[in-house]
Structures are given as structure tokens and as C-alpha cells.
Image: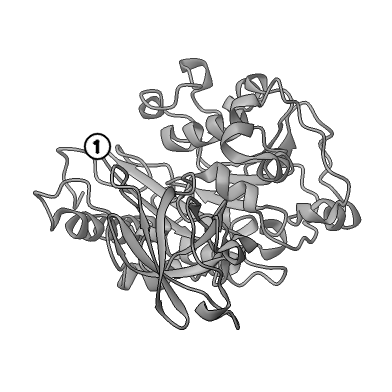
Amino acid sequence: MSKRDRTSLSSLAAEGAGGASSSPPTTEAKRTKKNTTKPDAENMAANGNNSDNNNEPMELDEDLHSRQLAVYGRDAMRKLAQAKVLISGMNGLGIEVAKNVSLAGVSAITIHDTIDTDYKHLSSQFYLTEANIGTNRAAACAEKLQDLNPSVEINVDTRPAEQTLLDAAFLSQFNVVVLAGDTCTAEQAVQCDNICHNAAGGSIPFIKAETRGVFGTIFTDFGPTFHVSDADGELPHTGIVASISEMDETTVIVTNVDDERLEFEDGEFVTFSEVKGMTQLNDGVARKVKNCKPHSFEAELGGSMKCSDLSPYESGGLVTQAKQPKTVSFKTLAAATNDPGEFLLCDFAKFTRPALLHLAFLALDSYRSQRLAAGEAMGGGAAGGGLPAPGGDAGG
């Protein structure tokens, strides 16, 4: 997994994606405790992916979401509260994602599954019981998921991938699409990602996750132009200015107090405040820094400002990191499969482990596709979904 691929689903749902279109009504797509008719084209166009179309700010329940407000902020929480999420695969991983997204307080979740409950599912899916054996997994756990957060609309869809995950009109309803394992083949997952990546109304963020025993893999594609306003989510670094001196006509050298280390990096931007003497620096303009050291850095004045325009420095001042927005381009699933880029290292004593696991998951995908092509059911087999059973005969 690439470093830039790491993000929380809640933050992603808050970002959203533009555009919406209609999906034909179906009796197989059910809505828990709601009207069972799917929204028509006019309503979906008004209430689809782009939640920013509503100019009136949404009222938030500050008592209910007080902790999330402190983490995400009001703007992100308003977008989150209007987000619609599709989660395909109600296995152990999928239900955990659905539970967390529901508790985060999104507008609606559609849980999609084509597999009926079997005994092997009971060990990891905490909403399934023996009474659900033979029942579609999404339909079996929908009511309990709805009870978890009554303010979130829970929809159920049990149609095959060809009518859902590969239907651009259906996918355009959602702000985020999550594939959690075993409801489609690897080839269908690639097609689904391509639809999301190239969506006409703007890319739909796509997440594909899978677990096999103690191992897991995750892929994220937030589109070719994903805008990031805060790359790390940390509070801006600050420092107390001890002195400011001229280096050349357009650059000054800034030092801080001896008992405090600066945490700025070359290429970042900072703003000055409360500087006495060189008051021209207190204009709030973000200035680029370079040659950063623990107790000093160089700052470019920028624009037409010259050192000769500055008054002599007297004392004091604060310097604060000014985070700059940036645009990130994500690979498609097809491209990342062949060229995954930099992996996230969990154990620095095993540098080759992530690449080997990547190949292992690709091998399982290939084996599974062959078994499914040979006629095995999507949820069939001792291990499920065309995979070999642990300790069994892989060729059987």
C-alpha cells in the first residue's frame, strides 16, 4: 500500500464526489425501515454525490457528535452527515466497516451482498447467528445495523455485481464505494474502480480491502485530482523568534530561542506575528522556508518585498507553520496491481514481506477467478468464494 493511499474512511466520506444519476427501481434492493422505492432521477440529481450544492449550512447535533467535531471540524462533519456510502460484502470485514461508518453518522449506507449465510461466516460476522443460515448476509444483518444508529438510512441490495458494482448509474449515487472481499471477482473489482475513477460527475472515491487470516490488504483510489487541505492532520508547528537578520536582498535568517527545537522542513511555508521592529513581516503572508535547522531557518520574503523595505528588528515574534493545500493523483487498481509503488512497512526487520504478501493476494485472486469460471458459486467451497480450504487440496 502506498503511503498516500492511507486515509480514514470517515475523512474520505466527508470529502465526497460530484455528480448523480438515476438507477432503475428494483424489488431486490430493499430499504430498512424506509420506503422501499428507490429515489427517482430528479431526487437523486438533487441529493446525489455533491453535498455542497446545498447552500444552507446543515444543523449538527453537537451533543451527539462532540468528539467528532473536535477531530473533523464543522465543515467536514456537515459533509460527512450528507454522505452516501456503498459497502459491498457483509463478511467480517464488511460489517466492521459498516458499523464504524454508521456510528460516524453518515446520511445513508447501502450494504450489498450476493452470498447466503453459511456456518463458516458465523466465526467473523458478529451480526449473524445460526438462525440466519441460508439467508442473504446483507438482509440478515440490516435490521441490527439500523438499530445501531437509527438516524442513518440503511439500504439493502442483493443483486449481482453486473447490476450494481458494474453499473455506472448505480454507483453515481454514492460518495464512497467500498469493496470488502468476496462479492465480486478481481476482474470485476478493476472494472468497478475504472467506473469510479472516470465518473462523469467527478471521481467517486474507491476502497478495496480484504483479509485472509492474520493478513490484510487495502487499496484506495480517490481519483486523478484529489485535493488535500491538511496532509497530516496535526496542529501547525510554532516557534518563538529570538532574532531576525538579513541574509540577502530577498531572504532573512530566523533563529528561535535556545530551549526550543523548530520542526519546520525545507519547502514548507510559515507566517510571522507579534514581531517588534520588522512589523512588515506581520502581514499574514505565507513565506517559504529553506535550510531548516533545529534552531534556525531561512525565509524568503516573497513578492516585491526586499530586506531594504524592512524596519530594523527589535525583539520578539512568533512563527507558525502555514499548511498549504495540495492535489494528489491516485493510480487505478489496474495500474497499482502491476506497479504498487512504495509499500507501508509494519516490521522493519522484514523489508520483503509486503511485496510477498502483495503477490500472495494476487495469486489467491487468480486461483479464485479460475474456480469461479469453472462454475463454483461466489460463496461456495469449504473456504468460500472459490478459495482453497485450509489444509485442503488446492486442486480439488
Could you tell me residue 332's position as x and y percent? 46, 69
**Which residue is disc 1 drawn over?**
214
Instruction: Please state the total of marks drawn on the protein image.
Output: 1
Where is 350 relative to 169, above or below? above
Could you tell me residue 93's position as x and y percent? 43, 36
Tell me if I can see residue 374 in this picture.
no
Q: Residue furthest left?
A: 349
Tell me if I can see residue 343 in this picture.
yes
| Residue 196 image-quadrant placement | bottom right
Q: Residue at x 70, y 20 (%)?
A: 63
Q: Residue at x 80, y 58 (%)?
A: 22
Where is 299 relative to 114, above or below? below
**Which amino acid is tagged 1?**
Val
**Element assignment for label 1:** loop
Where is 186 relative to 303, above or below? above
Which quadrant: the N terminus?
A: bottom left
How many C-alpha atoms fall within 10 Å of the one at disc 1: few (<14), some, or many (≥20)?
Answer: few
Could you tell me residue 297's position as x and y percent? 35, 64
Colour scheme in use: one colour
Could you tell me residue 75's position as x and y percent? 70, 45
Q: Residue at x 66, y 54 (%)?
A: 16
- Closer to the camera, 29 or 396? 29
| Residue 276 image-quadrant placement | bottom right
Q: Is residue 364 left or right of residue 352?
A: right
Q: Is residue 338 left or right of residue 174?
A: left
- Closer to the camera, 149 or 374? 149
- Closer to the camera, 335 or 238? 238
